[in-house]
Structures are given as C-alpha cells and as structure tokens.
Image (cartoon, grey):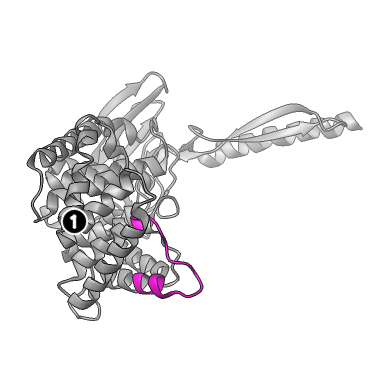
Amino acid sequence: MRYSRKSAGILSLLLLFNSIGMTACGQATAETGHVSISMTGMENTPVINYTVPTLTPNVLVDQQGYAAVGEKQAVVKGRQSVETFRLVDRETGETVYEGTVKQTDYNGELSLYIGTADFTDYTGEGEFYLECDNVGRSLTFSLKEDHYQELLEALCTNVHDRCQDRSITEDEIITLLEACEWYPQVLADDNGNDIPDLLESIADWLEKTANDTEKPEPENMCYVAVMAKFSYLYQKYDVQYATQCLQHASSVYTKLMSTSGRDAEKFMALTELYRAAGLYTYRNQILEYKDFFEDNTSYLEETAYLYGSMTYLATRQPVDVDLCTVFMESIRNRGEELAKRSHNMIDAVMNVNNGTEDLLKRAEELSCANYVLYSYQYTEILEDFLHYLMGRNRDSVSYYPEEGDAADYLLLIAQQVSLADRH
C-alpha cells in the first residue's frame, strides 16, 4: 500500500510537469528560477527532490509601458532564431504592427538566440503585447503619450504622503532636492503659487521635523545638507523662511563639527552651506579635502561626494579652479566608464549586476554626468535602466517601485520628462 501511494505521487508530479509544458504552449520557457518539491521518508529525510522551473516569457518588455512617441524595444530570446514579431492590441486581438527581429546573436553559454523587436514606428496608445512564432508572447504593457509624466506624478504623490507622515529619509530628500534644482520645469504646481509642489512637500517635512516635540530632530550632516540646499532653492519664494533654514543648518553643523571627521556627508554639507551662505570658513574647510580628491579616483562611489561635487561646480561663490577641474574630469570619466559598462549591467538576458540598489546608484551617477555634460547617448542609456528595472530583464520582474528609493526613480523619470521634446 505504501508503494502504491508513493508511485501515485510520482505519477501525479509527472502529470503536473506535462500539464505545465502543454499549458505554456510555447509562450514561456523555463529559463530562470526554480521551485523545489521534496518527498520525505518516515524520518523526514528527503529521498527524492524535484525542481519545477519557473516559467518566464521569451519576449521581455517594460511592464510599466512605454512612451507612445519614442524608442520602444523588447528583447526576444529562443532556442531557435526568430525572424518577425507582431504588436497585438490586447483588447481586440488585432495585429497593429509587424516588424523584423534585429541584431540576432547566438549566446553559446545560454544556447539562446537573442534579438531585438523595435516597434518605435508605432505611435498609437492602448494596451498591447508582442508575440513571435515559436517563442510565444510577452506580458501586457501600455503605450501612452504622457507615460513618463504620469509616472512622475504618481511618484510625487507618493513622496508627498511620505513627507507628511515623515517616513521619508534625509538621503531621499537630498535626491529629491536635486530633482527640484535640475528639473523644476517638469514639476507640478497644482495650487498655482509658482512653487513646485514637490518643494512644498519638502518644506512641510522640514517644518514638522524641526518642530516635533516627541521625535528628536536628526543630528547628522546629511540633514545639514538638506536644510542648506533647501534654503538655497527656496529663497526666491520665501526669503525669511529660507534664511531661518540656513541659520538652523549652520547651527546644527557647528554642533556636529567638533565630533565629526572628514567624510563624504560633511563635505556635502559644507558645499551646500558655502553655496547658500558664501562664508570663507566653509570654503577653507572644503579645500582641506583637495588632496584627497586629487589622489583618489573612486570617491564618486559615495553619493554624498558626488552631490557635493555637483554643488561645488554649480556655486556662484569663488571656487578653486583646480578643484573644479578635478571634479569635472572625474564626473566625465565616470560617465564614460558607466556608458561602456551599461550594456552588461542591464543586459536583459544575462543579469550581470549587483541588484536594484546598485543599479539605481549607477544610474544616479550617470544622471549627474548627463546633467553636467549632456549626452543623447547617456539619456538613452538611462531610459534603458528604467526599462530594465521595470521588467525588461531576465526574470521579467518589475522592480519598480517596490525596490529602491522612490527619490532615485523620480530623479530618473524627471530627466526623461524634461527631455521628452527630443522626439
């Protein structure tokens, strides 16, 4: 009797595998991910182990969608070469566009043919999927005229809520302030007071943070940098409040200075204080870092050094020309390096990267290079970063927005919105 039950269990599993294979009908393949099923003996010792492959599509797309007018590409993979693809309206089942799969290469390591389905020429809106003979179809995605603008508005709403309940961090706030400084023209002003709503949300966060009697105010250099940067950006809207923020930033910095070493966050705070206040004491302390920057090529790995460098380059106060040259060359070299590495980092099939957090950090670095030295190539690569994170990857997983800081995504998307007229 025991033997019959065990045999029946094995037979059921085999039937399950066959069912999965028949249900897939060529629309997905077991390329990545596994689910293990174990059978145990009387003493709970695994005696048989089956691994059920996780099925993923062979046509990889950005599941958040694409801008209707702009570059639109998907990655096609299969055990045999695929020549054509079809763009299908999900609602009607009608094929609205057909094209040729381009740049088909054979990856011997994976035993896969890999190509690109480019449907840039189609500019309609709606819900669609791509399908190819032999390898099946993609997941559904949307095409919208204001695709990035809608994503930006949703992120700003998310940020507003998190500023209200103060669940947002100083690290995220500093990135949001970069977006306010670089791309104010794309930020909403729903109440019509000429102040970007995002900047007003940050103002609310600052006021609550400084005046909360139950939760202690942050005492770190990043918070100092936030207050100083905010004061610089807000002075054209409310000089009095901006001045109060700057004075408070200076007070907190003085309190922390005696116990802080020479690190990235302190440097960022100094650059923001110097730009906003222009005091030579801040300038002199910045110059104490000069030898470090001249002898170090990896400091941009730390976001605080990166943002501090950007602020120093942007200040209208007197600066050290040699130090500015070091920063410009470092940022330019970093941009070139990331552009060369990006193909591997966001390869839709190989996944040669260190995860979402690291990808967002690299995209952040490339955004800085693109802001200082605008490059159409950088802009395209940054859009590809977004497509990768939103589902055009080996596992067909959309990491947006659950994984990674919303502020990082907002900075990247704001850049895409600001350059939308390039099409």
Can you give x and y, in whole percent of width and height, for residue 201 in the image?
Answer: 32, 71
Label 1 sits on a secondary structure element that is helix
Quick check: is 83 in the magenta stretch? no
Can you give x and y, in whole percent of width and height, for residue 382 in the image?
Answer: 25, 45
Can you give x and y, in whole percent of width and height, for residue 259 in the image?
Answer: 39, 50
Q: Is residue 42 visible?
A: yes
Quick check: is 207 in the magenta stretch? yes
Residue type beneath disc 1: Tyr
- Which quadrant holds residue 2? top right
Q: How many marks are shown on the rendered structure?
A: 1
Crowdedness near tag 1: few (<14), some (14–19) or many (≥20) residues, C-alpha within 10 Å: many
| Residue 109 in the figure: left or right of residue 419 | right
Residue at 18 percent across and 35 percent down: it is 330
Q: To which residue does mark 1 refer?
A: 274
* Residue nearest the observer in this picture, 223 or 303: 223
Q: Residue furthest right?
A: 1
Q: Measured along the vertical axis of the image, is residue 198 above or below residue 391? A: below
Q: Measured along the vertical axis of the image, is residue 315 above or below residue 309? A: below
Residue at 65 percent across and 34 percent down: it is 36
| Residue 371 in the figure: left or right of residue 176 | left
Can you give x and y, in whole percent of width and height, for residue 263 in the image?
Answer: 33, 43
Residue at 24 percent across and 55 percent down: it is 67
Q: Measured along the vertical axis of the image, is residue 69 above or below residue 45? A: below
Image quadrant occupied by the N terminus: top right
Q: Residue furthest front?
A: 258
Q: Residue furthest top?
A: 108
| Residue 74 in the figure: left or right of residue 242 | right
Range of magenta residues = 206-223
Q: Is residue 98 visible?
A: no
